[in-house]
Image (cartoon, rainbow, N blue to C red):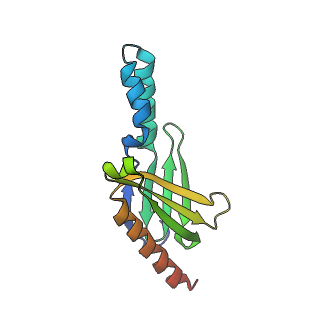
């Protein structure tokens, strides 16, 4: 974090529920060793994708062995949408989709996270605060 006043507002990862179909198939085929290994890889990849929302940026880290970290400056967020499909809503999950002015990532999704309404509101407030701070 470059700004000493930058605060972490939320840190988390997507719910494993996001991959429920893969897990179900792997459990059905569990007498075979390959599906269990595949289920472990899917679980590990999901846990290795970490979202961190700060007062200045959204940082997304991915990768198991090789790590990649993408930063999205919050002042680049143009629009945000909270999606709560029925199956996710039943589990208390939601997906936040951001439309940005970033060239490399014009659309960013924070998929299947719990407490998505609070995160969505925190994100909206942080975007507004950064815009006011930068005078944008």
Q: Residue at x 43, y 66 (%)?
A: 54
Give the residue at the far top of this rendering.
31
Nearest the camera: 102 or 124? Answer: 124
How many marks overall?
A: 0
Q: Which residue is drawn at 54% across and 40% down?
A: 66
**Image quarter (top left, top right, bottom left or bottom right) of the C terminus:** bottom right
Q: Can you say whether 44 is above or below 6 in the image?
A: above
Q: Where is residue 25 in the image (x, y as percent from the top left)?
A: 42, 25
Nearest the camera: 126 or 79? Answer: 79
Give the residue at the far right of this rendering.
103
Q: Where is residue 59 in the image (x, y as percent from the top left)?
A: 49, 58
Q: Where is residue 44 in the image (x, y as percent from the top left)?
A: 42, 36
Q: Is residue 130 left or right of residue 24?
A: right
Give the residue at the far front of this rendering.
86
Q: Position of residue 42 (x, y in %)?
A: 45, 33
Q: Can you say whether 122 is above or below 96 in the image?
A: below
Q: Which residue is drawn at 35% across and 53% down?
A: 89
Q: Can you say whether 26 is above or below 110 in the image?
A: above
Q: Work out whether residue 4 can be spotted.
A: no
Q: Work out whether residue 76 can be spotted.
A: yes
Q: Residue at x 44, y 50 (%)?
A: 50
């Amino acid at each position: 974090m470059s700004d000493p006043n930058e605060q972490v507002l939320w840190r988390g990862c997507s719910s494993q529920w996001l991959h429920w179909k893969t897990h179900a198939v792997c459990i059905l085929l569990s007498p075979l060793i390959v599906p269990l290994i595949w289920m472990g890889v899917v679980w590990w990849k999901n846990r290795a994708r970490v979202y961190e929302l700060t007062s200045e940026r959204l940082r997304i880290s991915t990768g198991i062995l090789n790590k990649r970290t993408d930063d999205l400056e919050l002042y680049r967020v143009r629009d945000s949408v909270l999606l709560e499909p029925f199956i996710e809503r039943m589990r208390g999950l939601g997906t936040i989709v951001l439309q940005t002015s970033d060239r490399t990532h014009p659309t960013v999704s924070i998929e299947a996270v719990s407490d998505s309404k609070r995160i969505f509101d925190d994100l909206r407030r942080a975007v507004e605060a950064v815009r006011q701070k930068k005078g944008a």
